[in-house]
Structure formats: C-alpha cells, structure tokens
Amino acid sequence: MSGKVKKTGKEMKTQVDENQLRKELRNQKKVNNKIDNDKNDQSSIDNVDLSLKPTKEIHLGGIEGGATHSTLIVIDGEGNKLTEIKGPGTNHWALGMQETAARISGMIDKAKEELHLPETVVFDCVGLTLSGCEEEETNNAVSETLLKEFPNASRAYFVGSDTLGSIKTGLSDGGVVLIAGTGSNALLINPDGSTHGCGGWGHMMGDEGGAFWMAHRACKYVFDDIDGLVKAPYSIDYIWSAMKHFFHVTERHQMLRHLYGEFQKSQFALFTKEIVTGCEKDDSLSLLIFEDTGKILAKHIEAVYKKAHNDLKLAEGGLKIVCVGSVWKSWKFMKKGFIEQIHKGQIIDELTLLLLTTSSAWGACYLAAEKINCSSVKKIYENNADVIYHYKRNNCGYP
C-alpha cells in the first residue's frame, strides 16, 4: 500500500465554519441527552468487540490541533483515508475544556455528515494530538469531558501533545520532533516509550529558534543600535525600514503598542517573513538572524541527543529528526549555522532531518489505532516525510 492513498468518491475535504459549528452543537446536545438516557444503548457502545467488526466498518480519527486551526483525518480499520476536515483551534488553555470538547465533537459530526453516516454511529477511537496537551491530568480531563458531554462522538480517545502526533506521522520506532513555528520545542521519544524534551516554555521563558524569537531579536538589534547601547554586527537599515513598513510606525516609541498594549505573539512573529525577504536580498543582518536560528535549533537536538537510545543513534542515517513549523521553510538560510553548531559541538556523529509531507493528523490516527489495539491498520511512514539534510561527521566538508 502506498503512503499516498488514492482518493475515492468518499474522500472529501471540507472547511468547518466556526459560527455554524456552534449552532450545530446546540442541536447535537439534544442527541447526546437522548443517548445519556438510554443505558442499554450506552452499554452496547462500551462493549463492542472490534475483532468481530469488519475492518471497513471500523472508524478511527486523528486530530492535529493548534491554537488557530485543526485538522481531522478519518480512516478505516485498514488505514485507508476516508475524509479530511478542517476546523478551528483546539487549545484548551486558550478556549477552556468545554469549548475545546465541543469543537472536537463538531468536527467529528461534520466528518460523519461527509461520509453519510448517521449521527448515532460512534467512532471507535479518535487520537487527539493538540497544542497545550502536555500534562496527563489535563489530557485525561479532555477525554473525560468528551466522553461525558458527547458520548456519541467516539468510544475512546488518545490525548497527547502536538509534538507526539508529528513524530508518529514520520517515524515508526521513535526519534526526535523539532518544532520551529511561532515558538519552538524539541521532544525525543525512545523505542521504549520514554520521552525527553527541550524548550517549549513559551516566549517569556524560551522559544529560541521560533518565529517570535527571531522577530524580537531583529527588533532588539534596531533598538539597541539606535540607543547606542550595543552596536549591531551589521547595518540595521533594511530591518529598521521593514519594521516601519510592517508595523506601520515611523519611530520606535510607536512600537510600544505592539510590544505591550496590543501585543499578539502570533502577529508579532509574522515579522519574520520580512527577515526572510531580507535574506533573499542578501541583507547581512537578516542572514545572521537565520544563521543564529540554525545554531540554536541544533542545540535543541544536542540537548536531547544525549538521552537517546543507541539503537536510534546507530540506525541507518543516524538519529532521525522530524522538522515541523513554518521556520523550516527557510532551511537554506539556517543550514550554515546548524551545521557549524553540530560539528563544533562534537556530540552528534550522524543525523537526518525530515520534513513532513502530510498532516500530523495521520500520527494521531495511528495513536488511536494503538489505543484500541487495532492491528489491522497499515501504518505508512516512508512516504510521509522527505529528507532535507543528512549529517555525518568527517563527511560534511569540515576538517
């Protein structure tokens, strides 16, 4: 079976309108109440034996959830993709537990609609790999809320972090996922299931190598240079001009509203696109910012590499790292700093960087299958990611 599944007449994509979703959820609650009152039906839902169920009739879901948008993929018991749904953000820290559960249930309902399934058909398991799901206690709360408030959505859930979904999409036996989007985060998963992380502490305490960190670093060069506090290593002319255009300011005091009163991290991070443009124009300060980004992301890998099992380090291609996030689109500008740090650190002998070619909702589907021991699901890894760089010491052009 190829990793790129051919589309069938059943396979569709649809966009969930958030306002319409809220209206539909009100009607959905009525159905939920009826199921709550029917104890016999609920008992039969809980005691379904999957071994007696045709694989084509098994329904598994996987949601890749972020702060601004989410993706649901539905597969059957053999791993064939049935449909894909786009929906709103599902970070429970920003939305609250009830609203997050309602949005997840709404996406599942929309998938049933696309597949022409009755609302009373209950999915066998849904994997949720969501932004903000880092703690077992709150992860259990997400699952319990869904089971209680929306019992006809799914019989079971796996709940974990978005990093876990990414690594499960691209790698079968463990490795590292390195996120460099608005923020940054590295997570190592060993074959025995043990995990070790580096970063992911948010912009107040970390996020080095993420887009916000890069945008802030660029602005800081301008402020310090003009103040005379610290001279920028290269001319600030391009960055300062880009700041004025992007933030619609004419002098630095007008930046204060973007830094404090009207601060929005994700919006501020978008300034990184202007730094990319600077790199394309061969601006030295822009190129330095990306070079430093490559170095700090390499340090994330060095931090978790020390705790990786030898079978990951000694595998063909060395330690595998799944790279996630928009910053990786500019890998060519980070590459120099990344290689220099890895070589200088003398910690890593070999590694391979992989870029996902599909949604990490696939990894969430695989986790759902594992949760209920659905071994008939064929898991495809080799076509879910492309190699963007392979490093091997003494074979990289360095002395």
Image (spheres, rainbow, N blue to C red):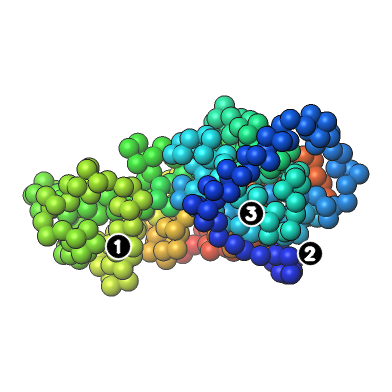
Q: Earlier in the sequence, mark 3 or mark 1?
A: 3
Is residue 93 visible in the rendered image? The answer is yes
Q: Residue at x 68, y 56 (%)?
A: 113
Choose between 52 and 238: the one closer to the eye: 52
Mark 2 → mark 3, Cα distance in angstroms:
28 Å
Q: Residue at x 35, y 36 (%)?
A: 205
Picture quadrant where residue 281 is located? bottom left
Asked if the residue at tag 1 contacts the one at tag 3, i.e. Cβ–Cβ closer than 8 Å, the answer is no
Q: Which mark is residue 275?
A: 1
- Amino acid type assigned to the residue bearing label 2 in the image: Met
- Amino acid type assigned to the residue bearing label 1 in the image: Ile
- Tell me the residue that label 3 is attached to: 110
Q: Which mark is residue 1?
A: 2
Q: Secondary structure at mark 3?
A: helix
Q: Earlier in the sequence, mark 1 or mark 2?
A: 2
Q: Decide: is 277 above or below 227.
A: below
